[in-house]
């Protein structure tokens, strides 16, 4: 049973073991082409799971590519969402979508997101990406089948590193308790995760004994022996009267010699030369039209570029970064400043860093990288954000200075109750790094793009929140928060290289905004501006104020350049790097003295805009003072896969969008005293 015509119940295609072996090899080749075209992704795990994906989609699971919502179909949940290309290829070879379309992997507006989204592509059962959640979803799907009297089976594909998430074991208990004999778990045991070997990062073995102790049947197989794979899947589907888990021993990067069993290929895509070499090893160089597929990706990207350009506000010149002979800027990832600070300050014996599996990417491992004697104060916690957060509170209680960090969406949302109760309620001295904040993770897609984290962090009593604008300011902020600030603290920074707009001499004081003013057009962008602490700024009768934080500060500065050169407007920029506690005086002075306030944030509109608006509406100093406001930010939507700078345009948070809004508000400012108040009938 497998690919069926749901209207007749007939099997429309049946694969032999030999055909499955050959198709799995083909799927590996197409996977590598798609990753090469995308320029990012997860080669290692997609290759390790491919034999299982081929067997499941082409022989074992019942489904109908012409009727993706067929009620009697088997459900396949990919809890390990970063292996999405394997899911897409299973669907493609089963006939749900053209295999050539996989060339659009991770591109803007493509249904082939970095992590699967069920609303974009028929055949995907659920949207996943945050590890550890899929098995709970599968439990719910299996329970629904029981309640409805359906005979479908629910398969859930997980990774072995993913077993470090506590939610997995809650779902394991639930499945056994409710006797879900229609649920099949599949663990891709490739023994590697981002930070290294699973056994070194956070050992999860013995998995077989653990699952059995919870009341599951366990099948242990070689995940690359197609006979064993098919036999195990068919036995599990037939049922044991209880939930079943298949522990499949696999090799990360399977099939490509220079990728096999290397943690470095977890989150990496092959270059063109590596792709060709891999296809030769797989015997596919003549079977897969890889150049045609890469051309499809190239043509699609050209159309994306055209559409993005068409929707951008237009001005007299092209003001985009480094597109002119003057105003050149250096780009550097803000995360580097975080690592530099930990490397510099790590000799303090109180400092303890907790690793959450993306340590190199967020640079927290710089704490010990050049000083191995600090390794004893490095605590690997694995993929377990909730437990690590509470453990950090315990460390802080005993007088240590714990630092933990991961993707901002996991560092501030998945563990929110632990931050609230374990850290903030006790007012413990814990530094949390919300790394890769905003849209800077680009192609990973919505599940990994933190666009809501600042709502949560700013809403917590006792929590201080800093959103630095570049790598230099990130280092200064971390220096201060780590050793000088007491209490819960959250620092948010990006992954992508962003403009360096400060210098060593640029002031940084926690809780006090900087005022930035454009003075001239200069060969170097940073030299065109003067920056002072807000309390030292004297009113220059500027036309408007842009209040920004994080990567939006450089965009605000570029907007000021546009406004000056094209319209003659003078702009006061407030770098509100400390979002909580906010600099009330700086905001009030800007409102009274310029009369126009625009907020700019790489976040859902509100984390900055609403805090500023509350100051404007609540302060007696502004009673009777006309202040026109506008907000730039993400407009109540989830993210999308795409290159980071594409998403800046797509989400309409670029300097061009800020400047466009400024021109609109300046027009309103000029006519405020001339026109009648707008009637509600016009709203």
Image (cartoon, rainbow, N blue to C red):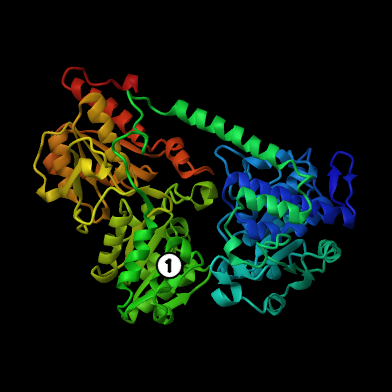
Residue at left offset 59%, top offset 45%: 38
User: Along the horizontal axis of the image, is 274 left or right of 624?
Assistant: right
Residue 149, image x and y in percent?
Answer: 78, 54
Q: Give the quarter of the image for residue 99.
A: top right
On screen, residue 520 above or below 183: above
User: Along the horizontal axis of the image, is 488 left or right of 617?
Assistant: right
User: Along the horizontal axis of the image, is 367 left or right of 669?
Assistant: right
Locate the C terminus by quadrant: top left
Instruction: Report which residue position mark 1 lands on.
Output: 418
Residue 648, image x and y in percent?
Answer: 42, 40
Q: What element carries label 1?
A: helix
Front one among 344 and 88: 344
Residue at left offset 28%, top offset 31%: 562
* Residue reaching furthest to the top: 675
Front one among 199 and 412: 199
Disc 1 residue crowd, few under 14, some 14–19, many 20+, Cα 10 Å: many
Residue 423, image x and y in percent?
Answer: 36, 69
Residue 194, image x and y in percent?
Answer: 55, 65
On screen, residue 27 above or below 403: above
On screen, residue 58 above or below 197: above
How many discs mark residues in the rendered view?
Answer: 1
* Viewer can see residue 660: yes
Front one among 398 and 520: 520
On screen, residue 127 above or below 366: above
User: Along the horizontal axis of the image, is 71 left or right of 454?
Assistant: right
* Viewer can see residue 132: no
């Amino acid at each position: 049973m497998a690919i069926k015509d749901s209207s007749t119940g007939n099997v429309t295609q049946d694969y032999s073991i030999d055909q499955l072996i050959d198709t799995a090899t083909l799927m590996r080749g197409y996977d590598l082409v798609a990753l090469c075209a995308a320029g990012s992704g997860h080669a290692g795990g997609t290759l390790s799971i491919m034999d299982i994906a081929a067997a499941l989609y082409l022989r074992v699971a019942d489904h109908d590519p012409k009727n993706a919502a067929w009620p009697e179909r088997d459900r396949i949940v990919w809890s390990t969402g970063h292996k999405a290309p394997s899911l897409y290829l299973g669907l493609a070879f089963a006939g749900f979508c053209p295999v050539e379309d996989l060339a659009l992997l991770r591109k803007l507006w493509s249904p082939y997101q970095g992590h699967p989204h069920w609303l974009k592509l028929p055949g995907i059962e659920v949207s996943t990406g945050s590890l550890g959640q899929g098995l709970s979803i599968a439990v719910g799907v299996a329970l629904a089948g029981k309640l409805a009297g359906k005979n479908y089976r629910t398969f859930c594909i997980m990774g072995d590193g993913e077993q470090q998430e506590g939610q997995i074991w809650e779902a394991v208990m639930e499945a056994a308790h409710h006797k879900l004999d229609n649920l099949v778990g599949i663990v891709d045991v490739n023994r590697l995760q981002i930070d290294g070997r699973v056994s070194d990062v956070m050992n999860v073995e013995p998995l077989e004994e653990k699952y059995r102790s919870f009341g599951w049947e366990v099948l242990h197989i070689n995940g690359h022996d197609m006979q064993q794979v098919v036999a195990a899947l068919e036995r599990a589907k037939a049922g044991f009267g209880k939930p079943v888990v298949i522990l499949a021993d696999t090799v990360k990067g399977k099939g490509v010699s220079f990728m096999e069993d290397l943690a470095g290929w977890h989150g990496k895509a092959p270059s063109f030369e590596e792709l060709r070499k891999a296809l030769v090893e797989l015997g596919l160089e003549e079977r897969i039209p890889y150049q045609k597929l890469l051309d499809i990706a190239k043509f699609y990207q050209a159309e994306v570029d055209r559409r993005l350009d068409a929707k951008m506000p237009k001005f007299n010149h092209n003001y985009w970064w480094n597109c002119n002979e003057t105003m050149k800027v250096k780009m550097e990832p803000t995360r580097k400043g975080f690592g530099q600070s930990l490397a510099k300050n790590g000799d303090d014996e109180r400092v303890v860093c907790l690793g959450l599996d993306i340590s190199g990417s967020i640079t927290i491992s710089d704490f010990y990288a050049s000083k191995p004697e600090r390794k004893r104060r490095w605590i690997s916690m694995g993929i377990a954000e909730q437990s690590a957060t509470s453990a950090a509170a315990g460390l802080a209680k005993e007088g240590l200075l714990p630092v933990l960090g991961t993707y901002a969406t996991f560092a501030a949302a998945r563990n929110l109750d632990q931050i609230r109760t374990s850290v903030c309620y006790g007012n413990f001295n814990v530094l949390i790094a919300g790394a890769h904040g905003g849209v800077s993770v680009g192609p990973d897609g919505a599940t990994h793009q933190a666009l809501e984290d600042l709502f949560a962090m700013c809403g917590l009593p006792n929590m201080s929140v800093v959103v630095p604008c570049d790598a230099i300011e990130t280092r200064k902020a971390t220096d201060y928060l780590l050793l000088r600030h007491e209490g819960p603290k959250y620092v948010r920074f990006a992954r992508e290289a962003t403009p360096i707009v400060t210098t060593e001499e640029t002031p940084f004081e926690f809780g006090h905004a900087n005022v930035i003013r454009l003075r001239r057009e200069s060969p170097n962008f940073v030299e065109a501006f003067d920056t002072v602490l807000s309390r030292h700024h004297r009113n220059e009768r500027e036309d408007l104020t842009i209040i920004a934080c994080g990567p939006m500060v450089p965009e605000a500065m570029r907007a000021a350049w546009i406004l000056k050169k094209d319209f003659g407007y003078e702009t006061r920029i407030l770098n509100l790097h400390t979002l909580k506690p906010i600099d009330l005086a700086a905001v009030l002075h800007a409102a009274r003295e310029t009369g126009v306030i625009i907020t700019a944030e790489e976040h859902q509109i509100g984390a900055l805009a609403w805090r500023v608006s509350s100051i404007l509406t609540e302060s007696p100093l502004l009673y009777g003072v006309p202040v026109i406001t506008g907000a730039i930010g993400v407009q109540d939507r989830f993210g999308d896969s795409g290159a980071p700078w594409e998403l800046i345009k797509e989400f309409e948070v670029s300097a061009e969008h800020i400047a466009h809004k400024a021109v609109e508000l300046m027009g309103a400012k000029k006519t405020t005293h001339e026109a009648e108040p707008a009637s509600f009938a016009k709203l």
